[in-house]
Amino acid sequence: MKILRSYKLFSFGNRRHIILAAWFAVVAACGFTLKNIAAFEDFLSGFVGVQHMVIPCVLSCIALNGTMLANSANAGFGYKFFRSLPNAEKHFRRAVLGGNIISLLGTAFIAVVGSFYLESTLMLMFSVVLSVVFLSIMNFVQYIENYVVKLVLLMMTIGFAGGIVGFFGEREFTVPNAVVLYTLVICAAVYAVSLVYVLTNSKKFTGKEQKK
Amino acid sequence: MEDIISVSGLKKIYGKFTLGELNFGIPKGFSTALIGANGAGKTTLIDLMCGVIHASAGKINYFGESDDPDSPEIRERVGYCAASGFFPTNWKPKNIVSSFEIAYKNFDREKFVRICDELGVDSHPAKKQLPMYKLSDGNRMRTALAAVFARETDVLILDEPGSSLDPLMRDRLCDKFREYLDRGDGEKSIIFSTHNIADMENATDYAVFMDNGKILETGFVDDLKEKYIIARGDPENFPAAKELLLSYSANSSTFEGLAKAENSDKLKALGAVTERPTLQTLSVGLLKYAEGKR
């Protein structure tokens, strides 16, 4: 409950969650149509494939949780309010954790729903791995004050990931299960490190480390 | 006299700018104005007091109890409002209400709506709500002030609260200050920075003058008005009077300047007319003096 309240504190005024929920509904509906009705099969399978690549990016933005505004003095709005709150650091830590939980739940959602209609397990795995990789990146860049750098990093990663998915997708590449498993384990480990990093360095949010 | 906030050895280094080292106290139960030119360090000092930034050295003591600006108990008792862009630009008043209810134990929703009405806020929870970015600077400040006044606090620390307000609203803000102090019966205090010295004079009991990161002068306004005088005279007497003036302006028909009250008789002997300064003339005189000394 505390996590949710703190998450809300940093997320007021943005409609990211409504957009994401609508997005999920559309993807799920397309998947359902693809599986059961199979009209416009090529279009739908392409659409669903692209969405499985895009959704992780959106989820990672949720993990960032409005801190582009809240954390960044460069953005110029709101950060003084957030930093001056009682228990500001605790709220921030909980909010980041809340963003991560919501993003992981979203990832679980695309994994479960996708498993019903995606024929390629590889595509599904990529989607999950991408999500975890993006989440890790967002956690690592949380304290970079310049939000433009954050955006550029995110876009570069999206481009890179898009290229990999396209490369494997075109060649109908198959990967041994063990490789998929190892990849998932490594990504999960990196993600865990990123989460520990972002939570244990929350002093950076309050500017305490600017001491000279 | 008890201090609501006392500062000792406070220093903040920002690249080329250094605030401090500062040592002073702000008396409890009064309204204190931080006065200084742009870049004097007023906002930095306020940000340090409110825990937005942290000091490079020294400490700030709150209520004679704690030196920790991050203490949740202290922050509950401090009402802070930044000069501009205090809230995220996409926030509406309902978001401010919800966030204050989450963050503070002592926020009163009804009081917020009532103060929004008193301050003439166009967009508030009982009316059509607009996000901050669609509001004028004045409306944004009024909304932020309403939110701060709607909390039960022991000290208000406000950065340029009057700058974006029209003269009528500045007058109403002075009334709100008096009302807040009266309600506190000597227990509540206000600290604010301002450039609109003339308009905020009615709301100022104590003044802290700052220049280039240092404290130039502090004191109760009435005492400072006894300590300094404004002298005016004919230009032929200016060369002799100049030596007694801290700062001055002169032209072909007259001269005017700030001097210590102890020099009043000497200036009168030179044919100058002396008078008690207003806070505005005192501020200009002191800041000019500081500029000349740099």
Image (tube, coloured by chain):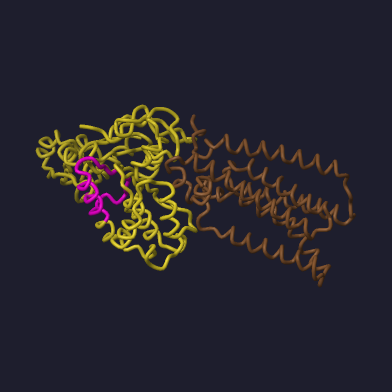
The image shows residue A86, relative to residue B176, as above or below, that is above
Q: Which chain is brown?
A: A
In this picture, residue A102 sits left or right of residue B157: right
Image quarter of residue B173 = bottom left
- Marks counted in the figure total 0
Is residue B179 on the magenta stretch? Answer: yes
**Front position in the image: B196 or A122:** A122
Residue B103 % position (x, y)? 43, 47
Q: Which residues are magenta?
A: B173-201
The relative height of residue A190 versus residue B87 in the rendered view (above or below) is above
Looking at the image, is A139 positioned above or below residue A114? above
Considering only vertical position in the picture, is B190 above or below A53? Answer: above
Rendered shade, chain B:
yellow
Q: Identify the residue at image location x=45%, y=46%.
A: A80
Q: Quadrant of residue B273?
A: top left
Q: Is residue B40 visible?
A: no
Q: Residue furthest bottom?
A: A39
Q: Is residue B243 left or right of residue A123?
A: left
Q: Is residue B172 magenta?
A: no
Question: Residue shown at 47%/36% (left/top)?
Answer: B14
In the rendered image, residue B63, in percent from the top left (x then y), is placed at 30, 34
Q: Quadrant of residue A43?
A: bottom right
